[in-house]
Each structure stands twice: as C-alpha cells, then as structure tokens.
Image (spheres, rainbow, N blue to C red):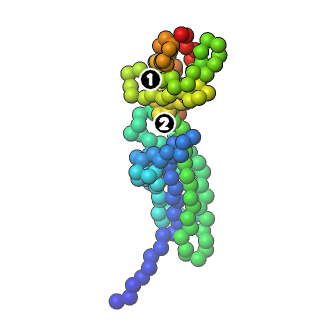
Amino acid sequence: MEWQTFGHRAVIAGRVTQQGTGKPLAGARVQVADGPDALCSADGFYRFLNLKPGQYTLTASIPGMGSRYGTTSTPVTLADDGQGKAVLQTVDLELPATTIQGKVKNQSDQAVKLAEVRVQGSGESAWSDAQGNYVLRGVEAGSRRIAVSARGFQKVSETVTLGQPGAVATRDVTLSP
C-alpha cells in the first residue's frame, strides 16, 4: 500500500484578542464573507483550511458577550503559489471592548490613586493608578451608572452612556473630602 500526502490549498489562520490589552478572546467568531466561520479556541486562535486563492473579508465578533465588544473586519488576499503548495496568510484581529475610562482627581485637580470605580449592578470594577487613570473594559453598551469611592473622600455616582458595542466613553470624576 502506498501512502499519499494531501496538503491544504490555502490557509488563513490567526488570533483574536482584545484591542489594547492583547488578551485572547475565547469563543470569538471569525467569519469569511459569504463563506465559512470558525470559533476561536481558549487561546484565541482560529483557522480556515482549503480556501481558493482570491479576495476575502474576515469579520470577527464575540456574540456570547452581548454588547461588551464591537466587531472588526479586514480584507485578505490569498495568492496561488502555482505549485500546489499551501499558502498561509496570518491575520490577527483585535476586537474593540466597550470601555469606560477617565481620571479620578480631587478638588485641587490632583490625581487620586487607588480610587475604586465600579459599574453599579454588575461586577465590573477598576482601580485608579498613581496618575488617577482608570479603565473599565468589556462593559455592556447603553446607559451605565458608575460609583467612584476612595478613602477620605465622599462617594460619587455618575451616569455614562455607551452608544454602541465597542464604544469608548471618557468620564473624569472629581471627589470631595
């Protein structure tokens, strides 16, 4: 019996991560326009095998996360090597997280470090850094209420509106003693 080796004609492979952090997004969906789709593994990797040479558009989303992430699309060109060997095109995709960010400061316009910023009614929270900056990624889009507290200051609550998945809203907060 003689063994035959079969190769793939063309392959698109890559990884889907959270924009700005590089965190892999397990369960993200990558779709070829008018073609197949693939779900990402736990480490964010996906692949498409045996594609014909030509122009493709890849679209990535993460439907299992509601409106916590936007989508992204990118064009891809697969070439034919003319010798029947597999052509690999690596395409990494970044999904924009729906984000609330800003700075926590005191009435003298100085940074307040280690202030807790919490989305009310959910488990999302972040701490301000030494410059007073905070970032909450992966928040549901819509109208959200944040509560900001720090030792020695009065708690403040404010409403932030995130118009669509993947939107970024900046909300600076001033705390009073």
Residue positioned 50% across, 33% down in the render: 137
Q: Of residues 11 and 155, which is closer to you in this image?
A: 155
Measuring from the top left, give residue 107's x and y in whole percent.
61, 12
Instruction: Give the labeled residue for mark 1.
Output: 119
Residue type at numbered disc 1:
Val
Residue positioned 47% across, 42% down in the render: 61
Q: What element carries label 2?
A: loop
- Can residue 136 be seen from the camera position used here? yes
Instruction: Return the residue found at the far bottom.
Output: 1
Can you say whether 6 is above or below 170 in the image? Answer: below
The CA span between labels 2 and 1 is 16 Å
Looking at the image, is mark 2 or mark 1 earlier in the sequence?
A: 2
- Characterize the local packing of mark 1: few (<14), some (14-19) or many (20 or more) Cα atoms within 10 angstroms: many
Can you say whether 28 is above or below 109 in the image? Answer: below
**Whether label 2 touches label 1, CB < 8 Å:** no
Split into 4 quadrants, where in the image is the C terminus?
A: top right
Q: Of residues 150 and 97, which is closer to you in this image?
A: 150
Residue positioned 48% across, 23% down in the render: 116
Q: What element carries label 1?
A: strand
Q: Residue 105 carries which label?
A: none
Q: Of residues 166 and 59, which is closer to you in this image?
A: 166
